[in-house]
Amino acid sequence: MALPTPVNGQITDAVTQANVKVLGDAPAMAMGALYQSLSHSTGILFENAVSSQQQLAIAAQAATNQGVIQIYSVDTMAGAVATSKISQSDVPDNMLALMSALRASTSGVS
């Protein structure tokens, strides 16, 4: 015990024991705070992982949708390209000449 003082010895013993208790509890409190911080960080990590999975699922759906749209538009695009190529060639002129010749030849027969 400390040197004799005008304060009662029981009071100084109680204060000393309270200080010792605080010092003894400090490591446990520090570990508790550390565990709490670690669990909070892990929770945020999992929230970010779920968010990333959701965004990837949306991107995969969009890519699939675009692929299906392209698959369904293949025949339409092929028809458009073929029509464009035919209209730029001399096939329509040849067809018109053949039709005119055919009409001329059949009109004299009847």
Image (cartoon, rainbow, N blue to C red):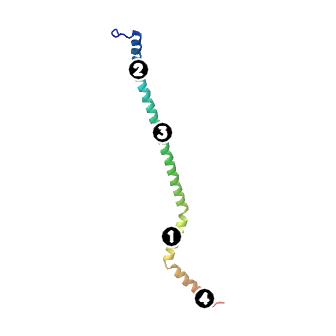
Tell me the tag on residue 46. Answer: 3
Of 55 and 105, nearer the camera is: 55
Pointer 3 with pointer 1, Cβ within 8 A: no
CA separation in Å, label 3 and label 1: 50 Å
Going by the numbered disc 2, the residue's amino acid type is: Val
Q: Earlier in the sequence, mark 3 or mark 2?
A: 2
Picture quarter with the N terminus: top left
The local crowd at label 4, few if under 14, some if 14 to 19, many if 20 or more residues have their Cα within 10 Å, is: few
Q: Earlier in the sequence, mark 1 or mark 4?
A: 1
Pointer 2 with pointer 4, Cβ within 8 A: no
CA separation in Å, label 3 and label 2: 35 Å
Front: mark 3 or 1: 3
Q: Earlier in the sequence, mark 2 or mark 4?
A: 2
Please report the residue visible at 40 percent of the width from the left and 23 percent of the height from the top: 27
Please report the residue visible at 54 percent of the width from the left and 59 percent of the height from the top: 69
Residue indicated by mark 4: 105
CA separation in Å, label 1 and label 2: 85 Å
The local crowd at label 1, few if under 14, some if 14 to 19, many if 20 or more residues have their Cα within 10 Å, is: few
Pointer 1 with pointer 2, Cβ within 8 A: no
CA separation in Å, label 3 and label 4: 83 Å
Please report the residue visible at 51 percent of the width from the left and 48 percent of the height from the top: 57
Front: mark 1 or 2: 2
Tell me the tag on residue 6. Answer: none
Picture quarter with the C terminus: bottom right
The local crowd at label 2, few if under 14, some if 14 to 19, many if 20 or more residues have their Cα within 10 Å, is: few
Going by the numbered disc 1, the residue's amino acid type is: Val
CA separation in Å, label 2 and label 4: 118 Å
Residue indicated by mark 1: 81
Q: At numbered mark 4, what does the secondary structure look like: helix, strand or loop?
A: helix
Question: How far across and how far down the image is residue 21, in percent?
Answer: 41, 18
Front: mark 3 or 2: 2
